[in-house]
């Protein structure tokens, strides 16, 4: 029988990039991942194809599965010979019940490893601008459960000792129990003027901090309607927050931005917006697929030396062209003497990274400006190859033909509607919680509207800013009945981001 293995992995405090390298490696090799409510679901995208994903989250009084049943589930899966990843929010051994799960594994002599994670107390406090220790304030810190009931007959918390015996006190899972925590601390001698902060969804763009003192924090939390999950920090170090805060001062902090670009192209936009503090919701409305039949492209490649110019209007076109060139056991030497035009810097970058600098990049990144520049060089009598999307504007081929050029248009990819879950995005729009939605091509506009044809898109867009990458995309929005709120001055992803930043500064 194949022997299984269990990895108890700390998923970290929430932010996707705060998981450990070893934790990420475990996710990649797991046959079954059993994950909690506080484990960021974005981490599941790193799991291998065919991996079994099982949600066993506990949220307040709503439990998907009781702890005893979770223990048995882990055992059952590993006894099937599987590599089981038990993915837990924070650290498995800090209020994560990891110890209980390991005790169950030991009964069956099951192999296991513990992969520590960054616990919420450390990460959330840092992201809120609050150091847990500071030599001018305190050298002691305690982590305590805030989940004990006030009517519990025998409390395991020695309030008389911790109230004044520890400089910084961190309570986990204590939002509902906040009034009792405050009462016990004050009754045990902690000053009512002691600074307090509650941090909800620490390290995420949805992070919210409410601060005050023991005397007024309950009222402030109620006024702010702050709910779990949150940690509570008590101590003089909380007073440093205003001076040391950094995360919630980012340019786009807390902004919900939906990006509609194809998933394989969205990483640059996603990563940059995330670094600027935005909560990015990837909602690809297009999927890039290669043609079923490469005959046209293969014929063009076989006679590649007959062309004077290769024109590329997208990164996708370049990548698929080069991939097909390699398929025929040919390389960039085949392009010797042929001039290359790239519509913009990102398209050009693919060639530059391969050691070829394009001969022409128009000053503005659209077809009309390619024609303008080509006219200066000469079009008549020249042969052009345009590898492009199946559905695209015919400005380039028409104008080149009009001016005496010979152009072959070859379809190297097409964009289709992806199988995307619309639930999260629909809910955000229905609740008017989307600040910006980005459109990077006419296809993203058309497909988004098609996907939500039966929804109240007009109502949604009254409170959401529509961000267009350039005039062609803007025209498509207008033709669909929607005016773009923002249009990038430079028709690139960097230009799109700059336009959002400029708007956020004004608003």
Image (spheres, rainbow, N blue to C red):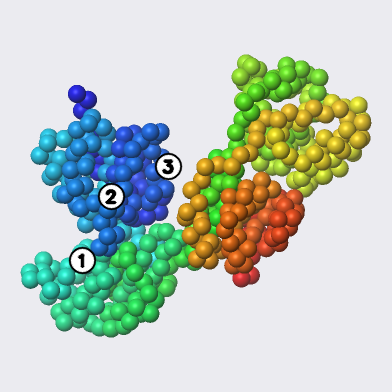
The reply, left or right, for residue 362 in relation to residue 176 is right
Please give the name of the residue rendered at 33% of the width and 72% of the height, measured from the top-left corner: 197
Secondary structure, mark 2, is: loop
Please give the name of the residue rendered at 92% of the width and 31% of the height, measured from the top-left corner: 404
Residue linked to disc 1: 147
Q: CA distance from mark 1 to mark 2?
A: 20 Å
The reply, left or right, for residue 51 in relation to residue 287 is left
Q: Residue 124: x, y in percent? A: 35, 61
Q: Upstream in the sequence, badge 1 or badge 2?
A: 2
Residue linked to disc 3: 45
Residue linked to disc 2: 56
Q: Quadrant of the N terminus?
A: top left
Please give the name of the residue rendered at 55% of the width and 55% of the height, measured from the top-left corner: 258
User: Badge 2: few (under 14), some or many (20 or more) residues near its Cα, within 10 Å?
Assistant: some
Q: Upstream in the sequence, badge 3 or badge 1?
A: 3
Secondary structure, mark 3, is: helix
Q: Upstream in the sequence, badge 2 or badge 3?
A: 3
User: Badge 1: few (under 14), some or many (20 or more) residues near its Cα, within 10 Å?
Assistant: some
Q: Find residue 143 and report its image quarter.
A: bottom left
When the figure is inspected, residue 294 is found, relative to residue 213, above or below; the finding is: above
The reply, left or right, for residue 500 in relation to residue 106 is right
């Amino acid at each position: 029988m194949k022997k299984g293995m269990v990895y108890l992995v700390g998923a970290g405090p929430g932010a996707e990039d705060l998981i450990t390298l070893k934790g990420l490696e475990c996710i990649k090799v797991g046959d079954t991942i059993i994950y909690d409510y506080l484990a960021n679901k974005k981490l599941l995208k790193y799991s291998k194809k065919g991996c079994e994903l099982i949600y066993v989250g506990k949220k307040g009084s709503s439990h998907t599965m009781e702890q005893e049943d979770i223990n048995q589930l882990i055992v059952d899966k590993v006894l099937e010979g599987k590599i089981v990843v038990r993915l837990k929010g924070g650290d498995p051994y800090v209020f994560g019940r990891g110890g209980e799960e390991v005790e169950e594994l030991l009964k069956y002599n099951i192999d296991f490893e513990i992969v520590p994670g960054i616990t919420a107390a450390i990460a959330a406090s840092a992201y809120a601008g609050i150091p847990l220790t500071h030599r001018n304030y305190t050298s002691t810190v305690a982590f305590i459960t805030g989940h004990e009931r006030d009517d519990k007959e025998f409390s395991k918390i020695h309030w008389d000792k911790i109230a004044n015996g520890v400089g910084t006190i961190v309570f986990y899972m204590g939002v509902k129990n906040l009034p009792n925590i405050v009462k016990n601390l004050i009754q045990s001698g902690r000053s009512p003027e002691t600074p307090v902060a509650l941090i909800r969804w620490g390290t995420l763009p949805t992070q919210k901090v409410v601060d005050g003192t023991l005397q007024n924090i309950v009222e402030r939390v109620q006024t702010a309607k702050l709910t779990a999950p949150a940690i509570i920090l008590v101590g003089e170090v909380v007073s440093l927050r205003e001076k040391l805060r950094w995360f919630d001062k980012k340019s786009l902090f807390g902004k919900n931005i939906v990006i509609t670009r194809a998933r394989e192209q969205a990483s640059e936009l996603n990563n940059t917006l995330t670094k600027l503090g935005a909560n990015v919701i990837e909602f690809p409305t297009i999927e890039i697929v290669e043609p079923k039949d490469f005959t046209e492209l293969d014929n063009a490649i076989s006679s590649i030396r007959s062309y004077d110019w290769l024109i590329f209007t997208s990164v996708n076109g370049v990548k698929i062209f080069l991939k097909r060139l390699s398929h025929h056991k040919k390389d960039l030497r085949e392009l010797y003497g042929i001039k290359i035009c790239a519509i913009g810097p990102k398209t050009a970058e693919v060639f530059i990274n391969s050691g070829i600098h394009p001969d022409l990049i128009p000053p503005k990144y659209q077809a009309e400006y390619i024609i303008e520049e080509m006219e200066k060089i000469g079009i008549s009598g020249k042969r052009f190859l345009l590898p492009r999307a199946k559905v695209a504007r015919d400005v380039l081929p028409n104008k080149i033909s009009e001016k005496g050029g010979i152009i072959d248009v070859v379809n190297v990819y097409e964009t289709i509607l992806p199988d995307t879950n619309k639930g999260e995005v629909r809910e955000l729009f229905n609740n008017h919680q989307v600040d910006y939605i980005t459109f990077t091509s006419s296809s993203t506009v058309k497909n988004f509207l098609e996907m939500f044809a039966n929804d109240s898109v007009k109502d949604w867009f009254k409170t959401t800013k529509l961000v267009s990458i350039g005039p062609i995309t803007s025209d498509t929005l207008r033709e669909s009945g929607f005016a773009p709120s923002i249009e990038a001055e430079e028709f690139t992803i960097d230009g799109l981001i700059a336009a959002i930043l400029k708007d956020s500064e004004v608003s």
